[in-house]
Image (tube, grey):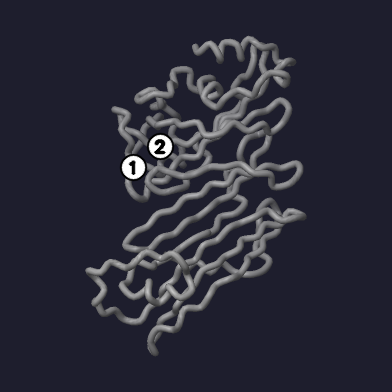
Amino acid sequence: MKPAIAVLLAVPALALAQVAEPQPDELLQIAFPKWKDEEGGRVQSIQTSAATRCWDARQGKKRNVIVVPRQAVRVAPDRIVLLVTLTPAGDGGVPQIAHGTPAGLAAYTFKPGKDGWKLAKRQEPFDLQGYEGRAQLGVLPLSPTKQGLHVTWGSCWQGHCVDLFALYSIGPDGVKPKPLLLQKIKGDNVYSRPDCVDRLAGVVQGLQPADPAYADDKVAPGRCYAIEGRWEVASAGALVLRFSGAMSKGGKEGNAPAQRIDQAMKFEFRGGRYVPVSGSNPVPDA
C-alpha cells in the first residue's frame, strides 16, 4: 500500500472534510487493490455485462480491461465519484481495439467509513462511447446544485470526419447511465473530394491544400462542408450549441457556392434530459 493511501485510510471519517482531497489513483486502489500506474499494473478484471458484451459478445463471467483514472469529483460532503476509462484487453494485457471500438466509461462512488474512504458503488462501465478505445472526459456545473460529465470523441474515415459529445448527470449516487444529451459537434469532408478545398476556401480559413495527386480527378457534383461547434450552459437550465463554418451543396445542376454557417441550437432541461426547443444541428451524418 502506498504511504499516501495508508495515511488517507487512517483519517477518521469525521475529519475527512478537513484533509486534502484524495487523488484519483489513491481512490482507484481502493476499488482495485492490485492496480498500479505502470505497464501491466493497469490491467484488471471486471464483471461482464450487457455493456461489455458490446465489445465482444463471446465473454465469460469476467473480462480484462485496462483501467485509467481520470478525475475525482466531490458530489456531496460525504460522497466522491471517481471517473475512469476502461479499454478491453486480452489475456496478456494487450489492448483489443479497432477503429470502431468505444471506450468504457466507468464510475466508482466512495463514502466515509470507519477507517477512511470506502467503495459504495461500482459502475463499470455505465456506458460505451468513443473510437479506437479513446474518449475525453471533463466535468462542469450544470446548475448551482448539479454537475455534469461531458464526454467528447471523434475520428475520420475516407476523408469524412466527425466529433460528438455526450452529457451525463453526476450525483451522490454516481453517474446516471442515460445521457442527458448526445449530439454531433463538429464535422467535415474537406479531404474526401479533390474540389472541396477550393470550394470552401473563400469562407473557411486555414484549410490545408488538397492532395495534388488527385487535383485533376473529375467528380460528380456533391456536398462539401466544414462545420465546427461549441456548446455552453446558459441560464435557467438551458444549453446552447453554436455552429460556424461553411457548406457548398451539390445537385443535378452542379455545385452551389459555399454558404457561411452561423447558427445556434437551443435545448431546455425537461423530463430528466435536454430537449431541443429551437434551431437545428447543421453537421451532416458522415
Q: Which mark is residue 97?
A: 1
Q: Is residue 43 left or right of residue 17?
A: left
Identity of the residue furthest to the bottom in this view: 253
Earlier sequence position, callout 2 versus callout 1: 2
Q: Residue at label 2?
A: 87
Pointer 2 and pointer 1: residues touching (CB < 8 Å)?
A: yes
Instruction: Pick whichever, 124 or 78, lies toward us.
Output: 78
Residue drawn at 54 percent across, 58 percent down: 183
**Structural crowding at the residue carrying mark 1, measured as other residues with C-alpha within 10 Å and reported as few (<14), some (14–19) or many (≥20):** some
Rendered view: 164 above or below 50: below
Location of residue 256 in the rendering, given as x and y in whole percent from the top left corner: 44, 84
Rendered view: 212 above or below 108: below
Instruction: Pick whichever, 105 or 53, lies toward us.
Output: 105
Instruction: Write down the quadrant of residue 61 in the picture.
Output: top left
Instruction: Write down the quadrant of residue 177 in the picture.
Output: top right
Location of residue 122 in the rendering, given as x and y in whole percent from the top left corner: 55, 30
Location of residue 64 in the rendering, given as x and y in whole percent from the top left corner: 38, 30
Where does the C terminus fall, quadrant-wise? Answer: bottom left
Say which amino acid is labelled 1.
Ile
Residue drawn at 24 percent across, 71 percent down: 214
